[in-house]
Image (cartoon, rainbow, N blue to C red):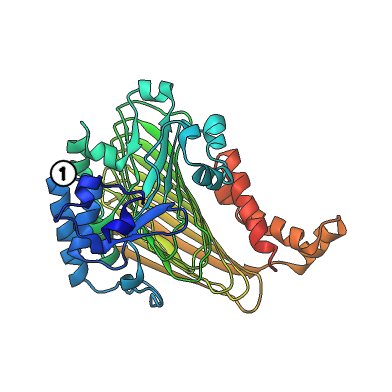
C-alpha cells in the first residue's frame, strides 16, 4: 500500500503517512492524474478521527466530533416528509480533498478547478459586485479573498478551519452548533461529526457592509458528501448581505449535501442570506439553516432552489428579541424524478415580533413540490404579527404540489394568517406572447420568471439574471 501511495498527492506529511499510527486502510486514491484523494466510504470513529487530523482540529473539536457521531448512531432518520430512499451512508465518502491548498490569488488555483468556477462567474463576480468571495471545491476551500476596505472595517471573513485555529477560536467555540445542536436530528449529528470547509463571518458593531459577501460550493466528486459549515455573527447595529451559491455535476450514484448554516443577528442588526442552489438530479440535499434574532434585529431569507433528487430544506428563524422581524422569500422548481420538500419555520418568542413568508413553487414533468410552513407564537410573544403566502404553479397534469401549513398560537394577542393558491399557466397568456413573436417555450419561461419575480427582485442584478437563466434552462426541456 505504501509503495502505491509514494507519488500520490497527500494532505498529511510523508512522515505521518509512514507512521504506524496512521490507518492506511481509510485512504482511497484516485488513479487518473491524482486530482484528489478521498477517505473511503462509510462512517466510523477512525474516519472521523482522520478528518479531524486533516483539519488540525483543537482537542475540543475532536471530542465534539466523536460525541456527534455517537448521537448520530442513536437517532433515527427524521420523518419530515416522504421517505429518504436510495441514500446509503455506507456508500458515501465523507471527505474529499482537491490537490491544492487554499489560495488568495485566483491565478494560483489549479487550472481544472479554475475552469469549473469561471464557468459559474467566479471570480468575475468578485471583481464586479462582491466585497469578498470564498470558493469551496468538494470538502475544502480552494480560494478565499476579501477586499481591503472591507477588512479595514474590522469585518472577519475567512474559512472555518482558519477561524478555528486562530485568535477567533474562542468565538467559534462559543457559537459553533449552538443554534443547531447535534441532537436536533440525525443529519445534524452527521454534520457535527464530519463537517469540513465553510465560512466564518463576523461583522463588528455598527458596521454596514455595502456590497455582498459570497461563498460558492462546487461539489464535484462522485458518490460523496459535502458538509460545509457556515457561521455568521452580525453584531449590534451592523448590516450584511451574504450570498451562497451551490452546484454539482450529474452522476448515476447518490451524493449527499448536509451542510449547516448558523446565523446570529444581534440587537438592531440586519442580515440578508440569499441562496441560489443548482444541484444535480442525483443529489440528496439535506441542509440545515437556522437564525437567532435579538431585539429589533432583522433576518431576511431569499432562496432559489433548483435541482437535486430529493430536498429537505427548511430555513428557520427564532425571533427571540422584542420587535425582531423575519422575512422569507423563496422559489422552488421541480422536474422529472424530483421530490422537493421545502419550507420554513419561524418561532416568535419576543413581544411585538413579526414575520412574513412569500413562497413560490413550480412543478413540471411529474415533479413533486411540498411546502411546509411552521409558525409558532409563544405566550411571551404578545402583539406579534405573521402572514404566510404560498403560490404554486403546475405546468402539466403529471406534476403535484401540496401546501402543508402549521400554526401553533399560544396567545390571543397576535395577528396571524395563511393564504395558499395553486394554478396553471394560462393558454391565453401563452398565445398572446407567441403572437408577439416568442416561441412557446420562451413564452412559458417568461411567465414562470414573472411568477418567480418576488425572489429575483430581491437579488443583486447578476444573481437575478442567473436565476432567470436557470428557469429558462429548466423550461427548455418541455
* Residue occupying image coordinates x 60% and y 39%: 461
Q: Relative to residue 51, is residue 238 depicted above or below?
A: above
Q: Quadrant of the C terminus?
A: bottom right
User: Residue 47, can we see it?
Assistant: yes
Quadrant housing residue 433: bottom right
Side (left or right) of 96 relative to 451: left
Name the residue beneath numbered marker 1. Answer: 58
Nearer-the-camera pick, 146 or 222: 222
- Where residue 45 appears, as percent x and y from the top left, is 18, 63
- Where residue 428 appears, as percent x and y from the top left, is 79, 66
User: Residue 178, can we see it?
Assistant: no
Nearer-the-camera pick, 341 or 295: 341
Q: Secondary structure at mark 1?
A: loop
- Where residue 395 appears, as percent x and y from the top left, is 66, 70
Nearer-the-camera pick, 342 or 223: 223
Q: Relative to residue 476, is residue 148 depicted above or below?
A: above
- Where residue 380 appears, as percent x and y from the top left, is 23, 52
For disc 1, the neighbor class at 10 Å (few under 14, some 14 to 19, many from 20) is few
Side (left or right) of 433 relative to 9: right
Amino acid at each position: 500500500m505504501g509503495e502505491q501511495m509514494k507519488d500520490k498527492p497527500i494532505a498529511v506529511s510523508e512522515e505521518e503517512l509512514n507512521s504506524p499510527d496512521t490507518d492506511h486502510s481509510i485512504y482511497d486514491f484516485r488513479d487518473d492524474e491524482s486530482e484528489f484523494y478521498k477517505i473511503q466510504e462509510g462512517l466510523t470513529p477512525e474516519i472521523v478521527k482522520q478528518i479531524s487530523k486533516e483539519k488540525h482540529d483543537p482537542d475540543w473539536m475532536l471530542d465534539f466530533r466523536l460525541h456527534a457521531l455517537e448521537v448520530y448512531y442513536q437517532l433515527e432518520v427524521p420523518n419530515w416528509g416522504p421517505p429518504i430512499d436510495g441514500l446509503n451512508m455506507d456508500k458515501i465518502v465523507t471527505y474529499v480533498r482537491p490537490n491544492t491548498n487554499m489560495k488568495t490569488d485566483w491565478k494560483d488555483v489549479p487550472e481544472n478547478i479554475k475552469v469549473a468556477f469561471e464557468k459559474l462567474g467566479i471570480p468575475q463576480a468578485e471583481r464586479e459586485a462582491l466585497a469578498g468571495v470564498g470558493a469551496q471545491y468538494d470538502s475544502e476551500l480552494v480560494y478565499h479573498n476579501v477586499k481591503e476596505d472591507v477588512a479595514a472595517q474590522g469585518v472577519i471573513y475567512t474559512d472555518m478551519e482558519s477561524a478555528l485555529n486562530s485568535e477567533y477560536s474562542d468565538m467559534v467555540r462559543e457559537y459553533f452548533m449552538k443554534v443547531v445542536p447535534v441532537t436536533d436530528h440525525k443529519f445534524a449529528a452527521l454534520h457535527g461529526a464530519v463537517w469540513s470547509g465553510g465560512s466564518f463571518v463576523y461583522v463588528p458593531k455598527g458596521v454596514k457592509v455595502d456590497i455582498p459577501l459570497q461563498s460558492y460550493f462546487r461539489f464535484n466528486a462522485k458518490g460523496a458528501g459535502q458538509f460545509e459549515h457556515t457561521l455568521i455573527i452580525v453584531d449590534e447595529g451592523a448590516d450584511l448581505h451574504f450570498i451562497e451559491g451551490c452546484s454539482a455535476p450529474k452522476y448515476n450514484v447518490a451524493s449527499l449535501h448536509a451542510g449547516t448554516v448558523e446565523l446570529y443577528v444581534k440587537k438592531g442588526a440586519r442580515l440578508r442570506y440569499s441562496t441560489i442552489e443548482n444541484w444535480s438530479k442525483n443529489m440528496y440535499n439535506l441542509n440545515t439553516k437556522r437564525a437567532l434574532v435579538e431585539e429589533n434585529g432583522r433576518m431576511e431569507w431569499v432562496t432559489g432552489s433548483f435541482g437535486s433528487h430529493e430536498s429537505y430544506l427548511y430555513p428557520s428563524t427564532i425571533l427571540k428579541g422584542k420587535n425582531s422581524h423575519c422575512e422569507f422569500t423563496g422559489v422552488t422548481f421541480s422536474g422529472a424524478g424530483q421530490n422537493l420538500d421545502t419550507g420554513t419555520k419561524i418561532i416568535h418568542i419576543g413581544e411585538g415580533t413579526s414575520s412574513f413568508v412569500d413562497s413560490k413553487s413550480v412543478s413540471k414533468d411529474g415533479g413533486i413540490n411540498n411546502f411546509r410552513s411552521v409558525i409558532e407564537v409563544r405566550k411571551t410573544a404578545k402583539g406579534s404579527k405573521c402572514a404566510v403566502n404560498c403560490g404554486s404553479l403546475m405546468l402539466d397534469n403529471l406534476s403535484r404540489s401540496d401546501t402543508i401549513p402549521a400554526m401553533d398560537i399560544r396567545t390571543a394577542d397576535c395577528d396571524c394568517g395563511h393564504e395558499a393558491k395553486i394554478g396553471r399557466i394560462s393558454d391565453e397568456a401563452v398565445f398572446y406572447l407567441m403572437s408577439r413573436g416568442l416561441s412557446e417555450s420562451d413564452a412559458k419561461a417568461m411567465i414562470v420568471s414573472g411568477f418567480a419575480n418576488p425572489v429575483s427582485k430581491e437579488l443583486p442584478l447578476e444573481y437575478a439574471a442567473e436565476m432567470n437563466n436557470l428557469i429558462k434552462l429548466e423550461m427548455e426541456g418541455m
